[in-house]
Amino acid sequence: MQKNYRHEMKHVINTADMLAIRQRMRAVATPDPHAENGAYKIRSLYFDNADDKALREKIDGVNRREKWRIRYYNLDPASVIHLEKKSRTGGLGTKYDAVLTKEEAAAIVRGETDWMIDAKDRPLVQEFYSAYKNQGMRPVVIVDYTREPFIYAPGNVRVTLDYDIRTGLKNTDFLDPLCVTVPARDAPILLEVKWDAFLPDVIRDAVQLGSRSAQAFSKYAQCRMYG
């Protein structure tokens, strides 16, 4: 389950920035083949403990941290659902994932996790079980947003534009496509750039925002502002 950490850079941008970057990326990169008409919707259910460990580590800027979520796409839980662990060390990040059935995801939301003990072919599921039990985790917030992804093979680059960030705080019925979510307060548009060993100049130029510098932003933390 070992994965290499990737460089990650985030910029909070405005609509004019997004329009400019979208045009540049369409000229030099390739839209993600999984996107429909250039975009797809993402719904995630995040987990934290009673002390809000993941949230506090993010706010406090802890150098080494991780968070757990369940995720599916285009509001279609009948397609594919992933359990994901996102780990970050400084400016480097990586993601581990395992496929869940809809029934397994529903069981997790209900707090039924003992079945994970027998998931020996999915070590990430067993790791989540251990974290869930030892840390006293529970589902805390739904995060919805729209993503426009671009890929560029040299450097294994992925550029994404995320917007229309919405929250379903304390509404954990995330498998229901009609689950009510509301706009996350003052949520911006987010540009994310991820790459392996090097970032090609053509991409660096395409995402250039003048004097604007990279900054930390968490959709999870933004959506937890409600409580």
Image (cartoon, grey):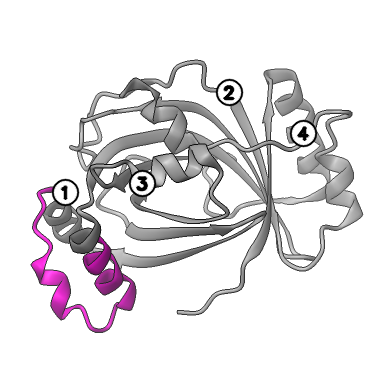
- Residue 138 percent across, percent down from the top left: 21, 47
- Residue 194 percent across, percent down from the top left: 68, 54
Q: Residues within 10 Å of mark 2 (few under 14, many from 20)?
A: some
Name the kind of residue labelled 2 in the image: Pro
Q: Mark 3 — residue?
A: 53
Q: Mark 4 — residue?
A: 21
Residue 36, compared with residue 197, is above or below; it is above
Magenta-drawn stretch, dominant element (helix, strand or loop): helix
Residue 184, compared with residue 171, is above or below; it is above
Q: Residues within 10 Å of mark 1 (few under 14, many from 20)?
A: some
Q: Residues within 10 Å of mark 3 (few under 14, many from 20)?
A: some
User: Looking at the image, which residue is at 28% across and 42% down?
Assistant: 51
Contact? badges 1 and 3 (CB < 8 Å): no
Q: Mark 2 — residue?
A: 188
Q: Dividing the image into 4 quarters, which one contains the N terminus?
A: bottom left
Range shown magenta: 109-131
Among the two numbered marks 2 and 3 on one chain, the one whose residue lies closer to the N terminus: 3
User: Looking at the image, which residue is at 52% across and 43% down?
Assistant: 36
User: Looking at the image, which residue is at 25% across and 24% down?
Assistant: 180
* Numbered circle sitting on residue 136: none
User: Looking at the image, which residue is at 83% across and 31% down?
Assistant: 209
Task: Work out how far the residue at label 2 is from the one at label 3, CA to CA, in angstroms.
Answer: 24 Å
Q: Mark 1 — residue?
A: 109
SS class of the residue under badge 3? helix
Residue 9, compared with residue 198, is above or below; it is above
Q: Residues within 10 Å of mark 4 (few under 14, many from 20)?
A: many
Residue 101 visible from this viewpoint: no
Among the two numbered marks 4 and 3 on one chain, the one whose residue lies closer to the N terminus: 4
